[in-house]
Amino acid sequence: MATQAPATAIIPQTAPRRLVLDVLHDWVTTVDHKKIGLMYIGYALIFLLIAGFEAILIRIQLAVPNNHFVSPQVFNQLFTMHGTTMVFFVGMPILFGFGNYLIPLMIGARDMAFPRLNAFSFWISAFGGLLLYFSYLGGSGLYGAGSAPDVGWWAYAPLTARVFSPGHSSDYWTISILLSGVGTIGTSLNIVATAICMRCRGMTLNRMPLLVWIYIVMSSLVFVTISPLTAAQIMLMLDRYAGSHFFDTQAGGSAVLWMHFFWIFGHPEVYVLVLPAFAFANEIIPVFSRKAIFGYPAMVAASVGIGFISLSVWAHHMFTIGMTSGANTFFVLATMAISVPTGIKIFNWLATLWGGKIHFTASMMFAIAFLFQFMVAGLTGIMLAVAPFDWQLSGSYFIVAHFHYVLVGAIVFMIFSAFYYWVPKMTGRMLNEKLGKWHFWLFLIGFHLTFDFMHIPGVLGMPRRIYTYEADRGWMLLNMIVSSGAFFQAVATLLFVYNMVWSYFKGPVAGPDPWDAWTLEWSTPSPPPAYNFVVTPTVESRRPLWDLKHPDDPDSHYE
Amino acid sequence: MSEAAVIPQNTNAAWELPSRGIVGMACLITAESAIFLIFIVAYLYYLGKSLTGPTPREVLELPIFTSICLLSSSATVHMAVSALHQGKRSLCSLWLAATVLLGGIFLGGTALEWYHLITVDHLTLQTNLFGTTYYSLVGLHATHVTVGLLMLSLALFFSLKGSLSSKHTGRMEVLALYWHFVDAVWVVVFTVVYVVGR
């Protein structure tokens, strides 16, 4: 700490106020990885609120039996938009936002490998998101307000055929995903090129922060998962506009082929989303345990292993279509095999915590909840990997509970953890710890009320995607509990938004290194200047700042 | 402060990283390969499943000459890059022109083939599953050839203008890599559509 010049720690807020237009022009034309990262995060947060609101509407509708809060048509649109938005316009951009912001800082570079491609990727993705929501206005021409896509986020054929999905709502869905896919591939390409070609002197692959490693794996996975989706969307567009027959069963086309193409994308996509959550955990858990990460090479190997195995598990989404027993067995075994590398990760994190001096900051509390919840989500995952069990529960609320346990319990928790950890670097202001803990506990209670209890109606036979149910099914109380949990989560999220706004203006000044951390981003002032580093750093170990703070006992002696 | 992280040791030791252009193009090629793979899977999956004619055996003829043109353009673009590397600018222009010409012949061949298929054999995207998968797969490849030809023509334009010099070798290598990829994909598409599929 002594080596940090105090002048940069206190941000002198004396810069002359600029015109709104100037500021706007600055942000629109920027190619700076930090600003693009922040725009990714901001845009994802806006969509998080929208898609969260849609979830609340869904839960109000399902809270009591025979409800008429929304019509069946609107309900279909709600779950379609909720799923599509959360995956493509919340999950992906928020993770790319953090990646964009952190990777150059962590490897001691001044920007990404292709700054202009970076800006292009962001804006094309943002345009995709806007287009998806423009469907509310333009889905059936301007007069047909309220005609958002209603084919589900998986858009199974032949639901998407012209006959069953007239108007343009499905086209908006297709094009918005196609565009966001282009942006995603652009950013992933950029991340890989940055991490491989822009590392500062001494930053060998073996010394790279685990976050960067995992982003390389995640981006490589994007090339082989988003591309099939892009290809399938091109086929769907040809079907809808040019009259081709890819998924047209009347002309011999196959609806199952769409399912395969979609899930070849869809399952690795889960790992594309969860790998960055692992990446955050790998940076945050060691710092708040005051120990170096346990098993660095095992972590890298496990991440790469997950990347490979995740490509051969997709058809576990399709056990109920009636595959051959050979195919069933293959996908059961592959799905079970993927729990081995994920298990390695869980044990490595536990071993990092073991004997550490744990600091229970808001960030760390979210990370610990992530550990537990991710494990539970993995356990129901292994249950569903067993084909006969899946035949019983596929298409029920048990599935919905399982994947929300991964997406919310693991990914969203870890994203919140990352916010509490890195926002001080991004804005130069600390988030309020007390509010953060309120946020944590409320969200935790809400999460468990909603998603623990959601498993049970699934086992009792409640199918997913239904807009209402009869009172005598025995799902009433359970659905009420599930819906009430959603409100806890909503309040907690609003508290978080308030905390972000409050801290931006009134939060205590963070200084360059508030957590006494070890990676290079904490060696820059908060927020870092446009050029990141005055002098490109040189590193000699995995924890360059530790070496600097402890010249008597540097890591480089042990690696 | 940023100086904090600087440990000025080994500053003279070599620290070389791969070219970002090549790495970026390799990533793009991986992504593009996945797109082609899906179209190829669709082609193979629907082979012989068309409910009506025409079938591939009835209408497709081996495009041997144009394929040879496209594949040899890989060699000419390689010659262009190595000429540029040695600073022989006019030689580079010559090889680039040859590449554009050969690529153009291939594209012209595809156009003629399609014209024949549409007007004589009445096979369109809408006719049957064969038409659907054939035009989309070959069309996807032709789109990539077109993009490559546009970029090669641009390089040729700059080369003729005299503004292409040996310091641009790195960039030309990236372009050449893309062109090799387009050619390699044609080998696969040719095998799938004209050999296995017939």
Image (tube, coloured by chain):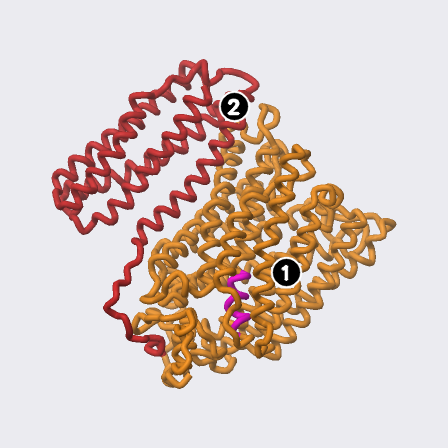
Chain colours: A orange, B red
Query: In the rendered structure, which segment of residues is drawn in magenta?
Result: A277-287
Direction from residue B100 to residue B33 in the image, left or right: right
Q: Residue at x 50, y 56 (%)?
A: A301
Kind of element beneath mark 1: helix
Cα–Cα span, label 2 and label 1? 43 Å
What is the x, y in percent for residue A152? 63, 44
- At x 63% / y 57%, what residue is drawn? A406
Residue A461, given in percent of the width and then of the height, sits at 79, 47
Quadrant housing the N terminus of chain A: bottom left
Q: Quadrant of the C terminus of chain A?
A: bottom left
Chain on which label 1 sits = A
* Quarter of image, res A542: bottom left
Q: Which residue is mark 1?
A: A374
Give yes or no for residue A519 being in the magenta stretch. no
The residue that mark 2 highlights is B47
Camera-nearest residue between A108 and A487: A108
Residue drawn at point x = 34 percent, y = 50 percent? B23
Amino acid type, label 1: Phe
Q: Residues within 10 Å of mark 1 (few under 14, many from 20)?
A: many
Placement of A482 over or under A16, stated as above or below? above
